[in-house]
Image (cartoon, rainbow, N blue to C red):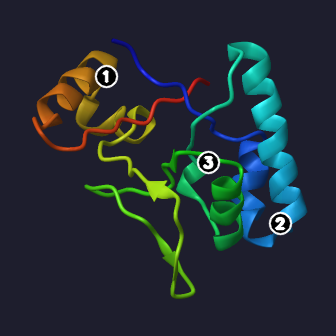
Amino acid sequence: MGHEVGLHGYDHVKWHDRLNRLSRREIAEQVERAIRIYKGILGVRPESFAGPSWHSTAQSLDLLNQEGFTYSSDTRGVSAFFPETGGVRVPLLQIPTTLPTMDEMLGIDGLDVQGFYKMIISRLRRNLLNVLTVTAR
């Protein structure tokens, strides 16, 4: 039992703010740098990717697929799917985030950390996809 550790990118701000303007080479550099650091820490290649701020483009999805990622989590939703871009199906499975993140919820109606975890547990659904995005800050 345990949990997977996926790749979340190299430069969060650059990906978030400029992904749609980055060249394929620049996207590849971001991904390759992140893979090197991940492998240096964990000793294995990452199998999954989650785009910073849930951002992706046709180029980034194609590149992640070519890099051999099993899936990416660049969306919000309720079930897994294969995205289409420009009418072409991308063979990189998308597994969406299904639950709200802590930073989105803290402070709403006085919600604190303990209350957040209780709320998340109450939203888990048996036999359905339950994906909680957690990032280190």
Asked if the residue under mark 2 is in contact with the one under mark 1, i.e. CB atoms within 8 Å, the reply is no
Q: Would you name the residue on which mark 1 appears?
A: 112
Q: Quadrant of residue 77?
A: bottom left
Q: Would you name the residue on which mark 3 appears?
A: 52
State the SS at label 3. Answer: helix
Residue 85 in percent (x, y) is at 55, 79
State the SS at label 2. Answer: loop
User: Closer to the N terminus: mark 1 or mark 2?
Assistant: 2
Above/below status of 135 relative to 114:
below
Above/below status of 75 relative to 37:
below
Q: Quadrant of the C terminus?
A: top right
**Mark 1 or 2, closer to the camera:** 2
**Mark 1 or 3, closer to the camera:** 3
Asked if the residue under mark 3 is in contact with the one under mark 1, i.e. CB atoms within 8 Å, the reply is no
Say which mark, if any, is on residue 22: 2
**Numbered circles on residues, count:** 3
Residue pictured at 38% horizontal, 56% vertical: 76
Residue 44 in percent (x, y) is at 68, 22
Q: Amino acid at mark 3?
A: Pro
Q: Residues within 10 Å of mark 3 (few under 14, many from 20)?
A: many
